[in-house]
Amino acid sequence: MRKYAAAEKAGPTVILEAGTGDSSEVWSAVQTEVEKFANVCSYDRLGLGRSDQLAVAHTADEIVADLHGLLHAASIREPYVLVAHSIGGIYTRKYADLYPAEVAGVVLVDSAHEEQFTRVAQISPEWAKRISSQFPADEQRSQGFLPGNERLAWHFDKPLVVIEHGSMPPSAACDPMGKQSHRQGGHGAQIRVRLYWMWRNGCEYSQSLEFGSYVGKLVIGHGVK
């Protein structure tokens, strides 16, 4: 596994976790800005970017163990602010569960949700079948997505920022997941930043108290820009 870190500064270390199939390169613009004021580290998961290739993709649990091992082997200073995009949000929540003493906060950038395929099936069973044909249920489970009879129970009592994409692009008009996201938080060409303090009662982040407001204008869509 390869890591990319700037010179050390005071304070927590920002760890950048990419989305499905992405290498650390997707964070290059973000890392350039963040390293002006904070310690920041991105890395390539095994099988991606410049890291070693894998014959069989690692599970979510293995990916979390890989990251933990890399950070400690490379002496990346704790505590960490974990910043995750897409499926990286699932890995980040697992990391925070397993190693809470190492985590100072979490930033979720248009994060995947452990129940998202179950919720999509409720909206459009036909579209859910299309997903399953390309991403079978056993692979979904291995990557941290929950079966229909389970619910996410995530307890996090530290600062959490959730960033959602803005209004649904035309290309997502027939995508039930895009429609669901649009209904929950589409707001024109602006992204919505919501700051939550997750109390110990374990409420789900999407149902928690909102404190934040709009910031800036970014390109609409799921990718990191």
Image (cartoon, rainbow, N blue to C red):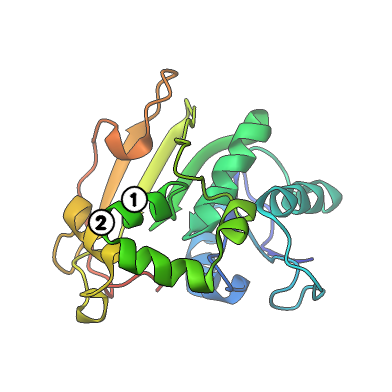
Picture quadrant where residue 52 is located: bottom right
Where's residue 74, x and y in %?
82, 54
Residue 211 location in percent, x, y? 23, 35
Q: Secondary structure at mark 2?
A: helix
Q: Is 156 located above or below residue 191 in the figure?
A: above
The residue closer to the viewer here, 214 or 56, is 56
Q: Which mark is residue 123?
A: 2
Total residue callouts: 2
At horizontal 41% and vertical 72% (from top left) the residue drawn is 130
* Residue neighbourhood size for the residue with mark 2, other residues' Cα within 10 Å, grouped as few (<14), some (14–19), many (≥20): some
Residue 22: where, in percent of width, then height?
57, 73
Residue 97 in the image: state x and y as whole percent. 61, 33
Q: Which mark is residue 18?
A: none
**Dot 1: element:** helix
Q: Amino acid at mark 2?
A: Ile
Q: Which residue is at a point 53% across and 65% down the rendered structure image? A: 19
- Dot 1, crowdedness within 10 Å: few (<14), some or many (≥20)? some
**Residue at position x 36%, y 69% in the image:** 222
Residue positioned 78% across, 69% down in the render: 56
- 189 sits left or right of 49 in the view: left
Q: Residue furthest top?
A: 201
Q: What distance separates the C-alpha of mark 2 from that of mark 1? A: 7 Å
Q: Is residue 142 above or below residue 104?
A: below
**What residue is disc 1 on?**
119
Q: What amino acid does circle 1 point to?
A: Arg
Q: Residue furthest right?
A: 73
Say if residue 19 shows up in the picture.
yes
Marks 2 & 1, CB-CB < 8 Å contact: yes
Q: Quadrant of the N terminus?
A: bottom right
